[in-house]
Image: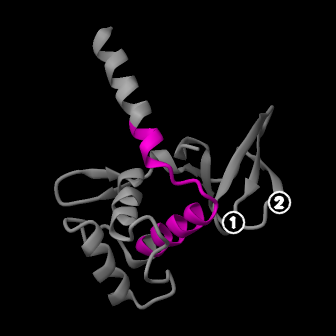
Amino acid sequence: MSLDKVLAISGKPGLYKLVMQTRNGFIAESLLDNKRMSVNMNHNVSVLSEIAIYTLTEEVPLKNVFKAISEKENGAETSISHKDSKDKLEEYFFEVLPDYDEDRVYASDIKKVIQWYNLLHKNDLLTFEAETQEEVTEEVSKEEE
């Protein structure tokens, strides 16, 4: 599953999988406990594919950050917890994304990224090879137009 169907809902713990759209919102399923809930348009919802991390030169899509974490951890869960100290989190994130903007990326953001990575890994939703192939196909079709 691509990150297009994975949601972060403000005020709700964890991540959610988009199940279906309704007239006034959508149905989302929690990746933590598989419970479904109705989400209306009043909720602040972020699609993970639209989130990026600030670096000193550009904004790096969250998918690329997850890929860098996966490469560092050899496809396993992170070696640190999202509950570790601010210094440990920043040191770890510096190893993953050396040029991240320390002024605009807070420890709370790093906690979320690590927590989300581990949750997606636990639910087998991190598939970088398939997404890479889809991107190549999309780029080729754009060039042909």
Give percent across and percent down for residue 12. 69, 66
> Is residue 24 or residue 145 the one in the foreground?
145
Query: To which quarter of the image does residue 8 belong?
Result: bottom right
> Is residue 63 or residue 131 the one in the foreground?
131
Label 1 sits on what residue type? Answer: Lys
Label 2 sits on what residue type? Answer: Lys
Relative horizontal placement of residue 130, taking residue 12 as reference (left or right)? left
Q: Which residues are magenta?
A: 110-132
Dominant secondary structure of the residues highlighted in magenta in the image: helix
Q: Residues within 10 Å of mark 2 (few under 14, many from 20)?
A: few
Instruction: Estimate the spatial distance between the alpha carbons at disc 2 and disc 1, rounded to whole Å.
Output: 12 Å
Instruction: Please say if 128 is above or below 115.
Output: above
Q: Residues within 10 Å of mark 1 (few under 14, many from 20)?
A: few
For the point 28% across and 15% down, the residue is: 143
> Is residue 1 or residue 62 the one in the foreground?
1
Q: Residue furthest top?
A: 145
For the point 41% across and 54% down, the residue is: 62
Looking at the rendered structure, the secondary structure element under dot 2 is: loop
Relative horizontal placement of residue 50, taking residue 10 as reference (left or right)? left
> Is residue 47 or residue 77 the one in the foreground?
77
Which of disc 1 and disc 2 is earlier in sequence? Answer: 1
Looking at the rendered structure, the secondary structure element under dot 1 is: loop
Q: Which mark, residue 35?
A: 2
117 inside magenta stretch: yes
1 inside magenta stretch: no
Q: Given this view, does label 2 or label 1 mark the residue nearer the observer?
A: 2
Instruction: Please say if 125 is above or below 99.
Output: above
Instruction: Please say if 54 is above or below 90.
Output: above
For label 1, the residue is 12
Give percent across and percent down for residue 60. 31, 52
For the point 43% across and 70% down, the residue is: 109
